DNA sequence: GTATCTGCAAATGTTTTGCACTCCA
DNA sequence: TGGAGTGCAAAACATTTGCAGATAC
């Protein structure tokens, strides 16, 4: 590990770098920053929000790169793209099917821990080959009920 | 009913006109055409598709009017706006919760007659006030499995 | 008659693309 | 070193908006 090399900087997170390698992707500073930001994040951010958050720390990052990275991560099964918010795509670091709730007042998206349908894809239903599914709830979150 | 009046034309469909009145909306040719096209339609069309379909028959119609009509119909509970397709909003003349399936190959959206979660909104779940919910399935439709 | 509705064109916001340059492996 | 990855600016879409004129009732 030599002076000034990328791998020597604190932003280089071996665990995330290996995750990218497993997907057949190069570990670039941009991708590591995006993965690190998403890791454990339950706010289900949009591409724009991720970009705004990372830009100050990583001024060279571009919105196009954020979109590109989210797309490859989704394609490799590393993250989930949510359709619950019809205004914009949102992203979830947890790639496994689970429930979401969109508050019609504040617009926030929450994970909602209720039972999922008794279904383990892939499975054939009525002739349809079901690979994945989503359950989305809409209403008012606890904070917005006041 | 006088010669040339709107109500005299065959496009004036009393049942749909009354539906609009019940929503507190005026029965215009544009709105009747949109309602008539959606009635019994299971293709879950987008605004653009509805516009393209109606334009030849009703050349004066505009895309903005299609969007506007779909929005008021949704607000009044007459139709359902689907978020299953992240590329565009799709619309369903059946306003009641039911399942949908999006084929990743052909992009078509189908109604999928499987059981819904045992939940009748509005209902409070884990502190969240749930007003409505959707269950969306993704995979390959029967025709695209070959 | 008049408030609602419409078409048009322009604006907005999100996401994608083309391309020359950069940098990870 | 070569190919994957990046930033930038422009393009492509989906959707909304402002407004003057049309029309349902």
Image (cartoon, coloured by chain):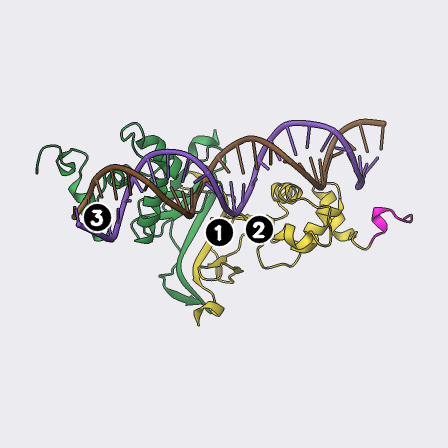
Chain colours: A yellow, B green, C purple, D brown
On the image, which quarter does residue B31 sit in?
top left
Check disc 3 and report the residue beneath it.
Answer: B19
**Residue depicted at 50% across the width and 57% down the height:** A100
Q: Residue B8: horizontal and vertical position, in percent?
A: 12, 35
What residue appears at the point 83 percent right and 48 percent down from the top-left corner?
Answer: A7
Q: Is residue A101 above or below residue D1?
A: below
Number of marks present in the image shown: 3
- Measure the C-alpha gap from mark 3 to mark 1: 29 Å
The foreground one among D10 and A59 is D10
Q: CA distance from mark 2 to mark 3?
A: 38 Å
For the residues tagged 2 and 3, is the chain the same?
Answer: no
Q: Is residue A124 left or right of residue C8?
A: right
Q: Which residue appears farthest toward the right when viewing the image?
A: A2
Q: Quadrant of residue A77?
A: top right
Contact (Cβ within 8 Å) of mark 2 with mark 1 = yes
Residue A7 colored magenta? yes
Residue at which label 1 appears:
A85
Residue B126 point in image, percent of width and height:
48, 68
Range drawn in magenta:
A1-9
Give the camera-side residue of A19 and A125.
A19
Residue at mark 2:
A46
Q: Toward the viewer: A57 or A101?
A: A57
What's the CA distance linking mark 2 and mark 1?
10 Å
Q: Position of residue C4 (x, y in %)?
A: 26, 50
């Amino acid at each position: 590990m030599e002076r000034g090399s990328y791998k020597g900087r604190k932003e280089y997170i071996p665990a995330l770098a290996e995750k990218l390698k497993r997907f057949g992707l190069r570990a670039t500073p941009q991708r590591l920053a995006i993965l690190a930001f998403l890791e454990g994040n339950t706010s289900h951010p949009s591409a724009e929000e991720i970009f705004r958050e990372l830009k100050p720390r990583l001024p060279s990052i571009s919105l196009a790169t954020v979109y590109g990275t989210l797309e490859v991560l989704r394609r490799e099964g590393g993250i989930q793209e949510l359709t619950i918010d019809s205004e914009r795509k949102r992203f979830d670091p947890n790639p496994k099917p689970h429930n979401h709730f969109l508050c019609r007042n504040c617009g926030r998206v929450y994970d909602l821990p209720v039972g999922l349908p008794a279904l383990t894809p892939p499975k054939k239903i009525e002739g349809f080959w079901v690979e994945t599914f989503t359950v989305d709830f809409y209403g008012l979150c606890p904070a917005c009920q006041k």
